Image (cartoon, helix red, strand yellow):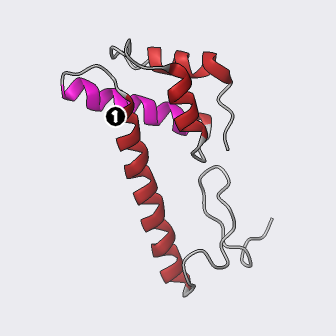
Amino acid sequence: MNKLGGRFGSKQSLEKTGTDCSGLDVDEVSELLSEERLNGREISNAIHTAGTLARYGDEKLQLSHIQEVLGVRRDFETALEKMEASTLGLAPGVGLTARQNTILTEEHNVQR
């Protein structure tokens, strides 16, 4: 799980989108984002992308916009993991370590 810096961090990110987010419940957004493995930059990017979707549709920013962005992100992450596993000749998820700063590392080939 992810720490957002409480309501202040989420509210601040929402306000920076330049999109009307008056109908959003900051606690609900914080809870949704805390369920994802995201760092601060990724949270900001997700919220800004959701804001862009809302502006494109001439709508207020809604939870559904954020959910859509997070869903696309998850799909991308899954595809990336499958591609990496295929390239390494591994079953998906086998031999891979957890992401660190969103860069995948392969457990037995990483030298630090």
Instruction: Bin the neighbour count of mark 1 within 10 Å (Cα to Cα): few under 14, some 14-19, many 20 and up.
Output: many
**View extreme (right): residue:** 112
| Vertical side of 29 occupied by 95: above or below | below
Read off the residue under disc 1.
65
Judge from the rendering whether residue 60 lies leftward or rightward of residue 26; answer left or right. left
> Would you say the magenta stretch is mainly helix, strand or loop?
helix
Question: Which quadrant does the C terminus fall into?
Answer: bottom right
Q: Residue at x 61, y 20 (%)?
A: 9
Along the viewing direction, whichever of 40 and 64 lies nearer the viewer: 64
What amino acid is found at the position of numbered circle 1 in the picture?
Answer: His
| Vertical side of 55 occupied by 111: above or below | below
Which image quarter: residue 24? top left
**Magenta span:** 42-57
Q: Residue at x 64, y 58 (%)?
A: 99
Along the viewing direction, whichever of 73 and 103 lies nearer the viewer: 73
Q: Position of residue 22 (x, y in %)?
A: 38, 11
| Vertical side of 6 occupied by 69: above or below | below
Judge from the rendering whether residue 54 lies leftward or rightward of residue 33; answer left or right. left
